[in-house]
Image (cartoon, grey):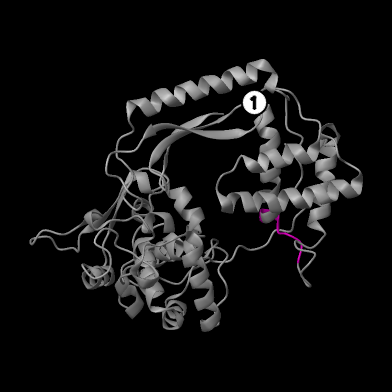
Amino acid sequence: MASGPKWNAQRGFWYAQFWDGKKTTRRKVAEGPNGWKPGDPPPRKVPSEAYSGFLHWEGVEKQAREKGGNRLPTSLPKFLEAHVAIYHSPGTRRMIQVAVRRFLAWCDEQGITRFDQVTTARCDEWMEYMATHPSDPSKPGSRPPSAATLETKRGYLGAAWGRLVDRKLIATSPWSGVKNYGEEREKPKKAWTPAQFRRLLEASEDWLKDILVFGVNTGLRIGSMSQILWTDWVRPEPEDRHFGYLNIRQEITKTYGYKVPVSGQLHDLLCRRFGKHDKQFIMTAKMGKPIASRSQTADGIIAACAAARLPFPESPNHHMRRTFGRWAVFGQLNGVKVPVYIVSKWMGHSTVDQTMEYLDLELEDSFTFMVPESAATGDSSTPPPATSASA
């Protein structure tokens, strides 16, 4: 379906994204503000002409569908290739391509080339096949994907048929209700310990050290971190007993705007960097230049992990965000255990359940909030030893 108006941060204009009857395409719907240049923050307001332009191209898409564009595909490879092309994010497209290529390779072995040959039974066979074969046959010792990974791959493929369901071309997706044969594995804790983080800093290049410290003290996504401005740092008043906060603007985050308090360590970093690197952006990369991409920081973290002989994180940039959340909850951020509902606000999550799942927290992790800090020293408030229910 058509979407927009969206902001092009590289060229400085608003555009609409829609289906023209053959492929998903983009069209400019409004120019950016006068004087805007690459690197400037996005405009706070969407101009009215951008909305009217989007409505025009939405109408074009509607006409294209009414003229016969809503036909079932015949070639399975072309259908899935068109599905991959819908995604403009290189990272997302790359992950979906991996699942699509593996599925098409299996279909080729089974003699499946047409769209109508993909039935629920065939989808079930593929899931069972994937659960018993290496994730990457080219790598010796590669294990079959876990249940969680296999479910993600099923979701990537099922989304293609889901679009046809949305357009009412098919009643149900053949991937709906397909059994997951993958092995359930314990999900690793996706965060550094304080000791691991110290080793990581020692092995990191100078430009990366500040990014790591900033990341584990704010929990910002790397996209937000690269766009946070000095004007977003709200300093405390003289009478305040805190270090101020960072104002995370709605346009640089996935959800609503929120605030993150500045820790003592982060305050020292901000004071040290102020006026010495970039007058606009707080965080920079090599040679004081803006953070170029997510891969720049991710590759730097992987290299530092290798030098420090630490396990490679599955998602290097998100490792900083999860470390922030877990350290706050367990009192490793500033020596005080922060309730999960507050950490949830600091991370911009909509629910506490989302935070619990994101940080790999169990319900039992919150029980220690009922134990006084002085209990560790063995005073009279120390909880009594557990007894059996029958007693």
In which quarter of the view is residue 132 placed?
bottom right
Q: In percent of the image, x 76 and y 66: which residue is there?
A: 143
Q: Is residue 207 above or below residue 16?
A: below
Q: In percent of the image, x 8 and y 61: which residue is there?
A: 239
Answer left or right for 93 relative to 4.
Answer: right
- Which amino acid type is shown beneath numbered disc 1? Gly
| SS type, badge 1 | loop
How many numbered marks have been drawn onto this rendered protein structure?
1
Q: Estimate the x, y position of residue 71 in percent, counting from the top left.
A: 73, 23
Answer left or right for 362 relative to 167.
Answer: left
Q: Estimate the x, y position of residue 40 in percent, counting from the top left.
A: 31, 50
Label 1 environment density (alpha carbons within 10 Å; few <14, some 14–19, many ≥20): some
* Residue placed most toward the observer, 139 or 178: 139
The residue at which mark 1 appears reads as 21
**Region in magenta:** 143-148
Image quadrant in which the N terminus is located: top right
Residue farthest toward the left in the current orientation of the protein: 239
* Residue placed most toward the observer, 74 or 316: 74
Q: In this view, does 192 lie above or below 133?
A: below
Residue farthest toward the front in the current orientation of the protein: 35
Q: Estimate the x, y position of residue 328 in percent, counting from the top left.
A: 37, 64
Q: In percent of the image, x 38 and y 43: which residue is there?
A: 12
Q: In the image, is residue 124 part of the stretch drawn in magenta?
A: no
Q: Estimate the x, y position of residue 97 in percent, counting from the top left.
A: 69, 50
Can residue 365 be seen here? The reply is yes
Can residue 175 be seen here? The reply is no
What secondary structure prevails in the magenta region?
loop
Answer left or right for 374 relative to 91.
Answer: left
Q: In this view, does 161 lie above or below 245?
A: above
* Residue placed most toward the observer, 40 or 322: 40
Q: In percent of the image, x 66 and y 38: which residue is there?
A: 159
